[in-house]
Image: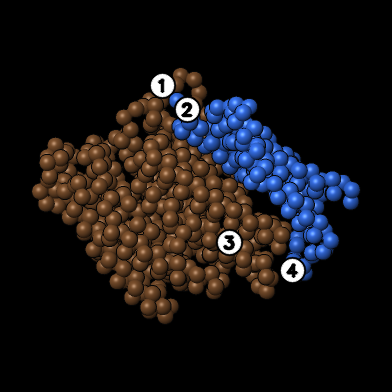
Chain colours: A brown, B blue
């Protein structure tokens, strides 16, 4: 059945691009929505131990794997793709444009699904590239100067990452003779003194840090997120960057480069710098989406920091924060899409007082920013708490304190955003603004409910959902 | 040994042609030829897995995406092509010389550092088996990248 997560979107693309273009353009969104809802349902059933495997596994034996980490990512991918498609319903006026967009989202979905189910370094690279190729087309989708500039920055840095990863894979082939995670992990453990192994690990991780937009490799991220169409920003910020960069680091740090102290130090430093640089840079932004992009860099820093800590609890915290961040960051980008579609701008100096005009967007934005800042009892609070406890228990007190202080910075810049966009009295342009359409309001409500639900129900889901995440750490 | 030298020389020539030629389509074909020669060298070095990666990604996939993109551009006039060629020669005239000298130096110095590699012997040499049984996911991935490339060309360059 896992192969269905790759083959069904592929089949959908083939069907959508058959003749009868007019009909297919109308159906494209339905196909996309069905596939994302099916993926969410399938993952939930699989988590509950009720997933069907028989038919598909008999006929399509692709070498895929599925553990707790994969399930969390597949669920996040399903939710964010659903969100992206619902937002596209509102933000693309032309059916033809939306058709092209849905096709690209399905390609990105296949890339991300493949990335999280693979157990081979080269295949991982191939599927990360699928996500990258579809991402830079999505960034450049509007074809204006900003979009092309954002896409170009992404292509250049992504190409550098690709070169690093391929070079690393070549070295692995040279040393190990195989590129599977298991063989690479075993060989790395046995070749501790080999002068080629550490550079190979370093190159691969650097490549993934570029893909993940972690400081100091974050140059492409703010331009790409802010230049992309609103719906594409949700996909990129919500899950695409996390899958191709951060998930891959989690997977390799735990399965291939296990217990590598040098790598852990690098991740700790990259994580803490990302948290601080992202938070300070977000404070100085005037554009809604650019500010959210820097906020993403900061929040991803928490995940990388937890990985650097390396204990089981820290890695559980990292995976949990990855899921939470994909939800509340998607929500914030949907809020920005709502504001952009109704007011025509994301420049915060031209906005103000939209809260009264857009009550659902205002309320959900408040929930998302409180969760991002780690305010109890919302989802973001619990994942940050787990990370900070893990850091403290591991003797990394300075890092824990900086992480807490950075949460206050997060609260500050998001409060500034909320005040400048939603609070106060609407200006002249704001008088005519109305609440966003049904697709966006529905998406905002679903994501806000997940953020509240995961937070409020945390005492119940801690043992049944959060702690079992560690089962992938063997 | 003779065939290895011929392959090495052909590799350098194809690479130089890729960089020097004025027409983008010829440059892409040059890149594909370079990859094919490199693939043959890898097979001869008993690395079928690396050879298959090189052949499928560089010679096949990348070329297909380049060519689909180039198909949407306008052809240069003869004058423009001649000017471009002159510019290339003025910029890169030293490149072939450096490549040949580097090749001779590497060959003469016998640079074979002892890296204590625990190199595993390749267990599979049949390309069909490597492509369809061992690396089928990569093939699927490359098909998807081709589709992405095609959508990219339509979304960004059409109209």
Q: Dot 4 lies on which element?
A: loop
Marks 3 and 2: same chain?
A: no
| Badge 3 or badge 1: first in the primary sequence | 1
Residue beneath the point at 48% across and 41% down: A134
Give the labeled residue for mark 3: A203
Do the residues indicated by labels 3 and 4 lie within the same chain of the protein? no
C-beta proximity under 8 Å, tags 4 and 1: no
Pointer 1 local density, CA inside 10 Å: few below 14, some 14–19, many at least 20: few
> In the image, which is nearer the foreground, mark 4 or mark 1?
4
> Are callouts 4 and 2 both on one chain?
yes
Element class at badge 2: loop
**Residue B116: % across, % down:** 75, 69
Q: Chain of mark 1?
A: A
Q: Is residue A92 above or below residue A337?
A: above
Neighbourhood count class around disc 3 (C-alpha, 10 Å): few under 14, some 14–19, many 20 upward: many
List the residue tagged with mark 1: A23
3D distance between C-alphas at marks 3 and 2: 37 Å
In this view, the residue in front, B133 or A162, is A162
State the residue at coordinates (53%, 32%): B150
Q: Are marks 3 and 2 in contact (CB under 8 Å)?
A: no
Residue position for label 4:
B115
Instruction: Mark 4 vs mark 2: give the one in front.
Output: 2
Residue A153 in view of the camera:
yes
- Res. B128 image quadrant: top right
In the rendered image, which residue does mark 2 sit on? Answer: B158
How far apart in space, not on screen, are marks 1 and 2 (Cα)?
A: 21 Å
Q: Residue at x 55, y 33 (%)?
A: B69
Distance (Cα) linking label 3 and label 1: 47 Å
């Amino acid at each position: 059945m896992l192969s269905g997560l790759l083959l069904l979107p592929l089949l959908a693309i083939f069907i959508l691009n058959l003749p009868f273009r007019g009909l297919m353009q109308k159906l494209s969104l339905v196909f996309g929505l069905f596939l994302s809802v099916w993926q969410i349902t399938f993952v939930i059933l699989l988590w509950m131990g009720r997933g069907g495997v028989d038919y598909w596994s008999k006929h399509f034996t692709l070498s895929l794997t599925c553990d707790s980490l994969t399930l969390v990512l597949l669920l996040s991918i399903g939710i964010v793709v659903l969100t992206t498609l619902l937002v596209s319903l509102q933000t693309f006026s032309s059916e033809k444009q939306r058709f092209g967009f849905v096709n690209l989202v399905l390609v990105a979905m296949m890339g991300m699904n493949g990335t999280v189910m693979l157990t081979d370094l080269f295949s991982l690279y191939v599927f990360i590239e699928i996500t990258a190729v579809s991402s830079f087309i999505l960034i450049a989708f509007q074809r204006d100067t900003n979009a092309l500039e954002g896409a170009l920055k992404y292509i250049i840095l992504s190409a550098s990452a690709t070169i690093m990863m391929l070079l690393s894979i070549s070295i692995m082939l040279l040393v190990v003779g195989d590129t599977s995670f298991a063989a690479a992990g075993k060989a790395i453990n046995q070749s501790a003194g080999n002068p080629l192994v550490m550079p190979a690990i370093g190159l691969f991780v650097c490549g993934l840090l570029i893909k993940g937009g972690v400081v100091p490799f974050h140059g492409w991220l703010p331009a790409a997120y802010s230049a992309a169409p609103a719906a594409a920003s949700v996909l990129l910020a919500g899950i695409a960057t996390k899958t191709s960069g951060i998930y891959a680091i989690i997977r390799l740090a735990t399965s291939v480069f296990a217990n590598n102290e040098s790598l852990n130090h690098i991740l700790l430093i990259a994580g803490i710098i990302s948290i601080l640089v992202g938070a300070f840079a977000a404070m100085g932004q005037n554009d809604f989406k650019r500010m959210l992009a820097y906020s993403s860099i900061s929040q991803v820093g928490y995940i990388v920091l937890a990985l650097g800590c390396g204990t089981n609890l820290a890695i559980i915290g990292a995976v949990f924060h990855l899921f939470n961040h994909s939800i509340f960051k998607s929500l914030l980008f949907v809020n920005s899409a709502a504001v952009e579609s109704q007011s025509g701008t994301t420049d915060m100096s031209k906005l103000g007082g939209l809260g009264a005009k857009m009550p659902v967007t205002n309320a959900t934005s408040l929930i998302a920013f409180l969760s991002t800042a780690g305010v109890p009892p919302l989802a973001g609070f619990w994942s940050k708490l787990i990370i900070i406890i893990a850091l403290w228990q591991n003797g990394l007190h300075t890092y824990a304190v900086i992480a807490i202080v950075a949460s206050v910075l997060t609260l500050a810049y998001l409060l500034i955003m909320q005040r400048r966009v939603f609070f106060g009295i609407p200006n002249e342009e704001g008088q005519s603004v109305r609440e966003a359409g049904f697709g966006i309001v529905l998406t905002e409500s679903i994501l806000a409910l997940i953020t509240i639900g995961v937070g409020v129900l945390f005492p119940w889901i801690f043992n049944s959902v959060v702690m079992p995440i560690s089962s992938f750490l063997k | 040994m003779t065939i290895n030298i011929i392959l090495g020389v052909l590799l350098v020539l194809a690479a130089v042609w890729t960089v020097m030629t004025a027409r983008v389509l010829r440059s892409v074909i040059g890149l594909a030829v370079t990859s094919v020669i490199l693939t043959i060298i890898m097979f001869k070095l008993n690395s079928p897995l690396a050879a298959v990666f090189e052949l499928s990604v560089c010679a096949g996939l990348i070329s297909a995406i380049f060519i689909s993109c180039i198909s949407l551009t306008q052809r240069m006039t003869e004058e423009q092509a001649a000017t471009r060629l002159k510019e290339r020669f003025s910029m890169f005239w030293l490149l072939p010389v450096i490549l040949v000298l580097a090749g001779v130096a590497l060959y003469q110095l016998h640079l074979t550092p002892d890296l204590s590699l625990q190199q595993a012997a390749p267990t599979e040499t049949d390309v069909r088996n490597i492509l369809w049984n061992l690396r089928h996911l990569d093939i699927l991935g490359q098909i998807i990248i081709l589709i992405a490339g095609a959508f990219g060309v339509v979304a960004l360059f059409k109209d």
